[in-house]
Image (tube, rainbow, N blue to C red):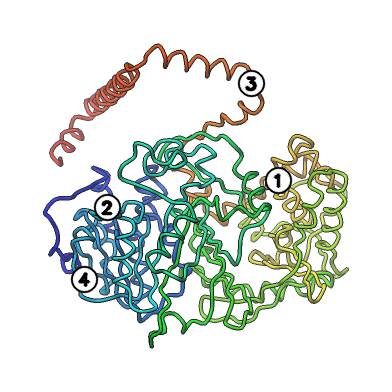
Amino acid sequence: MVEEKLDLTYYSGEDLYSDGAVEDELLEAVKNPSDIERKLMEGSSWAHLYHLSNIRENILEWYDFNPEGELLEIGSGCGALSGLFCRKVKHVTAIELSKKRSTINALRNKEYDNLTIMLGNFEDIRLTKKFDYVTLIGVFEYSICYINSENPFTDMLNRAKSLLKPGGKLFIAIENKYGLKYFAGATEDHTGRCFDGLENYVGVERVRTFSRGTLLKMLKKAGFTDNEFYYPTADYKLPDEIYSDRHLPSFGSIRKPCAAYDRERYELINENQAFDALCEDGLFKELANSFLVVSSVQEESDYTGDSYLQKTVEYAKYNRLRTPKYQICTRIITDKDGIKTVEKKALRTEAEEHIRALSDNRQKLLCLSDSVVPVEVLEQRGKTVSFPFIHGTGFVENINKNLFDLGKLKESIEDALALMFDFKPDAYVDFVPTEAFFQVFGVETFSLRTRQRIVSLKASNIDTIFENFIVGDLTGKCYILDYEWVFDFPVPLDYLKYRTIYYYYSKYNAYLSDRVSESAFLEEFGITGEMAEQFARMENGFQQYVHGEHRKYIYTKNYEKPVHNIGKNLQMGEGWFRSVISGLDELNHTLGPHRRDLVTARIVVRRKSEFWEKVKRNAKHPLRGLLKMLRK
């Protein structure tokens, strides 16, 4: 079955590039695809995360492909996206230089009979048909390696265009040369050095990324007249949100700076605050970390392309780092009449029950309050449910107007809480711990030293945070936008208030921490230290309920490399830090051309040390060491 997928017609007989021994590990990993998730949760290597994680699929899972279409995937690698495309379209032709990677792809996607993998350089392969879709995901920047010409990037676009049917779509995912993460100290993704792209790739030969403006000019020059830009965050490799020109992030939207997975990095600025400023000043599009561009040539023809859809996806958000039964996707969609809806979809079969429960959740909340109304369910079918998009002003927008004035901030928060927690008299019940409560919150004992009764509700919306409440422009009503987590067993009402305040403070910590501590902020709204301690344990239990024991499904944390924050030291003018930098400059000057020799010698010594450590370990277990040698 694997051999049938591989077309070796244009294969040279040698792999022109490789990640080395790690590809043997990947090959072993995909032999049983059901084990991939478990292996991801146990691993820590960037190569494993990048090649195996289904988070990679987020880059285009949201896009509504024509199921009768055919797709050409240029540079398919180990098949992280090939399976997604096989599920989306009628047939996928994948082109890849490496036989090892293609074998990994074929094994990984052996269940699909609509995949053909062609081995060879894209420039050399002769394709006799045209496609509805062509993808260059993490490939266009390497056009110099694939196309032997004076203008490899232009020629790559022209070749891709020649393979598209009239009205067909070209997808390019690429890092932004001027991505904020690079200004903030992240190493350039392809060279592993700081500032290479910002300094115009001087001395770099094999790779180029581009600004938004330059990329747009190149596409138009190649004849792509219709170009839609999307902005995957944190970047296109492992995105969890996809923004578009129709739906851009606002102040406070981005709270996940680009993690360092492949190597350690520096942090020169607070990326969250910088993105806040960029969003306010209308510069996000120019300094987003990555681009996804969907391009086409508008021609007169009978081909309808994707017009059968008559809708546009403006935004997508993914929750894949949860237990399987809670993994969902949220999309904002506009139809041909300009009507917006919000759609939530189960990403796995196990999560379909979670989606179906949303209608029941709404009914449970309807009877609690006259002040706020859970947004209505428009349609529920299969694994999806849709809601109207509410145009209005979010509670958090009004609150943030006073972010820099603590007195006014407290008043605006109290006003919001008054609405959010305005319940009917018969909505209240006494809190009594139940088995269901312990199952969700994992708190073996619950005790607050108080003589007063602990109040709860008949049904509790756990996600009572400011971002989930909005005042509608047309109706003036207050709406609850999200009610994914509603429980009909007693939950302390003060816990809901704790979450509201705690998550607001956490999100805007950089703006608040110099003026008020977290504990003092909570106290301002009636959450004592004892209560906060108890509720923090509850919150930890709830997070494990959502993300697995010890939050194991947030496996990306295992892959994060250290981030060295030198920006604050520079900002504060720390004398000791300037002294260290001065010492490094003096050392570099003294070593001169011998600096590289010293680094090389240090690496050799470290590798020899690691070798002898392995020898000592194997000496303790000679049989295991012998078996390892025999296997090699």
Question: Mark 4 or mark 1, which is nearer to you?
Answer: 4
Circle number at residue 508: 1
- What residue is disc 2 on? 150
- What residue is disc 3 on? 574
Question: Mark 2 or mark 4, which is nearer to you?
Answer: 2
- What residue is disc 4 on? 127
Q: Nearer the viewer, residue 55 or 525?
A: 55
Q: Residue at x 54, y 54 (%)?
A: 547
Residue 392 visible in image: yes
Distance CA(mark 4)–CA(mark 1): 53 Å
- CB contact under 8 Å: marks 4 and 3: no
- CB contact under 8 Å: marks 2 and 1: no
In the image, is 293 to the left or to the right of 600?
right
Q: Residues within 10 Å of mark 4 (few under 14, many from 20)?
A: few
| Earlier sequence position, callout 4 versus callout 1 | 4
Q: Position of residue 525 (x, y in %)?
A: 84, 48
Q: Residues within 10 Å of mark 1 (few under 14, many from 20)?
A: some
Distance CA(mark 2)–CA(mark 1): 49 Å
- Residue farthest to the top, as pictured: 590
For the residue marked with disc 3, what is the amino acid? Answer: Glu
Circle number at residue 540: none
Q: Secondary structure at mark 3?
A: loop
Question: Mark 3 or mark 2, which is nearer to you?
Answer: 2
Q: Residue at x 61, y 26 (%)?
A: 569
Q: Residue at x 31, y 60 (%)?
A: 156
For the residue marked with disc 4, what is the amino acid? Answer: Leu
Distance CA(mark 2)–CA(mark 4): 23 Å
Question: Mark 4 or mark 3, which is nearer to you?
Answer: 4
